[in-house]
Amino acid sequence: MKKLFVSILFAIDGLRYAFTSEKNFKIELSVALIVICMGLLLSFSYAEWLIVLLNIGAVLSAEIFNTAIEKACDFVADSLHPLIKIIKDTAAGAVLVTGIIAAICGVLIFGKHIIILFQTV
Ligand SMILES: Nc1ncnc2c1ncn2[C@@H]1O[C@H](COP(=O)(O)OP(=O)(O)OP(=O)(O)O)[C@@H](O)[C@H]1O
């Protein structure tokens, strides 16, 4: 139990690092908070909350993995190497995929609510 608690503390250290050092992580977290506030205002359904929260988790996790991969690359390679470029760029590509899917889900969910709002006024 104590080991689990210590592991969680180390994981929180990792999150703190991502938050303080990664500009993209801060931006994504801010967008996530805005989306959550909008969800509360628009009274998202249970299914909509599941989709929104899963997407937020996917984007933030991908960004944290990307940060870890970038740091590992910087540690092992102190000069330019084509394989390092592939590793970094594919990791960044994973973040992009999660971001695009999240954006599409956002457009579908918010779009539906905006249409409903316009129909009621
Ligand atoms: N050691 C390296 N060898 C080869 N290519 C590299 C190396 N380090 C970075 N690159 C590549 O150079 C480009 C810019 O990388 P850089 O890490 O500076 O910016 P970035 O990918 O936008 O990351 P950040 O989120 O830190 O701004 C990317 O295509 C990356 O893959």
Image (tube, grey):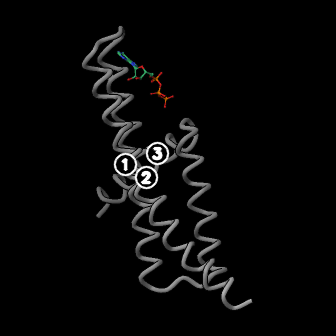
* Image marks 2 and 1: residues in contact by CB distance under 8 Å: yes
* Image marks 3 and 2: residues in contact by CB distance under 8 Å: no
Front-most of 112 and 9?
112
Image quadrant of residue 35? bottom right
Q: Is residue 90 above or below residue 41?
A: above
Q: Residue furthest right?
A: 121
| Residue underneath mark 3 | 13
Lower sequence index among marks 3 and 1: 3
Q: CA distance from mark 2 to mark 1?
A: 5 Å
- Looking at the image, residue 9 sits to the left or right of residue 28; the answer is left
Q: CA distance from mark 3 to mark 1?
A: 26 Å
Of badges 3 and 2, nearer the viewer stands 2
- Residue under the point 56% across and 73% down: 111
Front-most of 47 and 4?
47
Lower sequence index among marks 3 and 2: 3
From the top left corner, tell me how far across and down residue 28 is, in percent: 54, 51
| Residue underneath mark 2 | 100
| Residue underneath mark 1 | 97
* Image marks 3 and 1: residues in contact by CB distance under 8 Å: no
- Amino acid on which the number 1 mark rests in the picture: Val
Q: Residue furthest front?
A: 119
Q: Is residue 105 above or below residue 39?
A: above
Mark 1 residue's CB less than 8 Å from ligand 1? no
- Amino acid on which the number 2 mark rests in the picture: Ile
- Looking at the image, residue 44 sits to the left or right of residue 90; the answer is right
